[in-house]
């Protein structure tokens, strides 16, 4: 599986994604990723729906940026 990555800002808006927009929105809704962004988590690993998801918080230009990376799939 190619590494999938979504970059979001602290408001939950998509800054960058390695997937098509429709697939990105689908993953955000199905896996409830906004929940983690709103809680302002840092360096969290989550297992949901056969995905190992890593959520990292970075500060770029005095803004919180969340990098959500899908590490593995059971498929």
Image: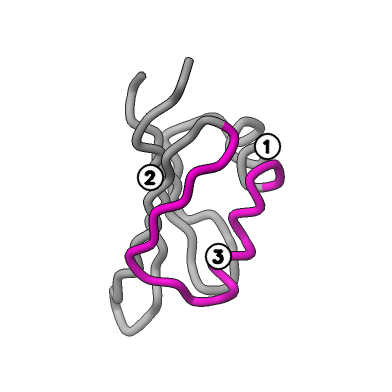
Residue 25 position by quadrant: top right
Q: Secondary structure at mark 2?
A: strand
Residue 27 position by quadrant: top right
Residue 2 spot, x, y in % from top left:
33, 22
Q: Secondary structure at mark 3?
A: helix
Q: Which residue is mark 2?
A: 69
**Which label is found at residue 36?**
3
Circle 1 residues within 10 Å: few <14, some 14–19, many ≥20: few
Measure the alpha-carbon separation of dots 2 and 1.
15 Å
Q: Which residues are magenta?
A: 29-49
User: In this image, 31 relative to 15: left or right?
Assistant: right
Residue 3 spot, x, y in % from top left:
33, 30
Residue at 39 percent across and 54 percent down: it is: 45
User: In this image, 23 relative to 73: left or right?
Assistant: right
Q: Which residue is mark 1?
A: 26
Measure the alpha-carbon separation of dots 3 and 2.
13 Å
Q: Is residue 66 magenta?
A: no
Figure check: 44 above or below 58 = above
| Between 30 and 9, the one nearer to me in the picture | 30
């Amino acid at each position: 599986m190619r590494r999938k990555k979504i970059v979001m800002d602290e408001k939950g808006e998509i800054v960058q994604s390695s997937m098509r927009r429709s697939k990105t929105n689908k993953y955000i809704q199905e896996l409830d990723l906004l929940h983690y962004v709103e809680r302002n988590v840092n360096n969290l690993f989550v297992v949901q729906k056969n995905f190992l998801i890593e959520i990292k918080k970075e500060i770029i230009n005095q803004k919180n940026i969340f990098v959500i990376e899908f590490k593995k799939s059971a498929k």
